[in-house]
Amino acid sequence: MLALFYPVIGALLLGLLVGFVGGMFRGQSHSSLTLPVKGAERAPELIAFLKAKGITVSPAPNDPRQEVRKGSADAVLVIPKGHKVDFAALRPAAVHIVVNATRLSTVIKVARVMEHVRAYDRQVGQARLADHGIAPEIATPFKIRSINVGRSRNLAGFFLNMLPPFIIFTIFVGGVYLAIDTTAGERERGSLEPLLANPVPRWAFMLGKAMATFAFTLTAVVVQLLAFKLMFEYIAAGEFGIKVNPDLMAFIAVALISLPLIGFAVALQIIVATVSSSYKETQTYLGLLPLLPSLPGMILVFVPIKAQIWMMAIPTFGQILLIGRQMRQEPTVWADIAVSVGTTSLITALLLYIAARLYNRDQMLFGG
């Protein structure tokens, strides 16, 4: 039950994160904005412009840097001495915004403030050009428009990139309890020796245990994919500003791509459980195993790379790239899938062969 519950935790955590962050963005973008301003009397036109945009101006604390650092204020607008003189002389007049960029709420608030301040800056600049008989368009040589060609909008792409590490972790955890118990566990209970005394090839026993572990791991992965689908369907499908919801075929493709990697993980688990001397030792090794393949996926959440075909030949790394591509609903590159599936399947077959050889050793009954 715990092995089937763990995959759901990832979807629940991601759903809560999507809801929290999306709700914060939506709330900040529609709520009234209060901005402490120090030196407001030095820029009355700017203050009037901000008030016209719905910003409530309040007195600033004596030490803006300290108050923002402590979290007493999200941001403080500081209009330094000399601003009024420089502004009147048509020279660049300084305006400072004190922020703490480690706070998400601050980042959202500052983005709104900066948008209005820049709008006022453009308005004043265009008015000055017009006063000198110069067309304001001359100061705007480019008409810039951002075109998003990705299927994911706003924060959705970031959250979709978090799915591969969760899935990889489940692949290496979903059936680990079964792999440990059917090998190291049976050895310690004394049930392995009479089992192997039956007139059946030992590789057949190993394959049966591996297939049971494979089925259990696949069940855990399917449970997690269904949980993610439900999360995107009901929690993150536009209600909180996340405008993407991968279709069912994307999740089916992820399950199919994961099949060779599940076999790879199961073969590793069987080998470790076979050569370990005790149940606890096996548990220690296999408890650390899921962290290694999941780490590249966590890195790729923040540092995306351009996938190349040779990367697909690396088990877990190739699947991370392919799963991320499917979740973002990017075009399918069949050559990459073929390399990933073929290479991982060959390595899995080699590992199963090694596991079968280990089962034929007499030391198998005693561990080590």
Image (cartoon, grey):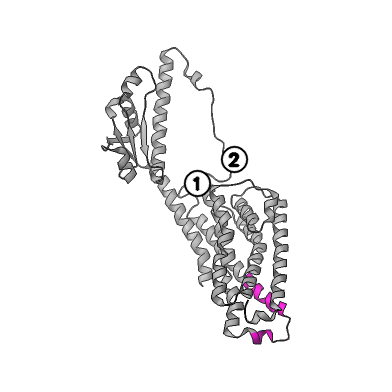
Which residue in the protein does label 2 denote?
A: 149
> Judging from the image, what secondary structure is the residue with disc 1 in?
loop
Q: Which quadrant of the figure contains the C terminus?
A: bottom right
Q: Which mark is residue 155?
A: 1
- Bounds of the magenta segment: 193-214
Looking at the image, do the residues carrying marks 1 and 2 touch, with CB atoms under 8 Å apart? no
Q: Is residue 40 above or below residue 185?
A: above
Closer-to-camera residue (285/340): 285
How many marks the image carries: the answer is: 2
* Residue 33 in the image, given as x and y percentages of width and height: 34, 39
Residue at x 27% of width, y 36% of height: 58
Residue 7 shows up from this direction: yes
Mark 1 crowdedness (10 Å alpha carbons): few <14, some 14-19, many ≥20 = some
Q: Is residue 21 above or below residue 145?
A: below
Mark 2 crowdedness (10 Å alpha carbons): few <14, some 14-19, many ≥20 = few
> Judging from the image, what secondary structure is the residue with disc 2 in?
loop
Decide which of tag 1 and tag 2 comes sooner along the chain.
Answer: 2
Residue 262 is inside the magenta segment: no
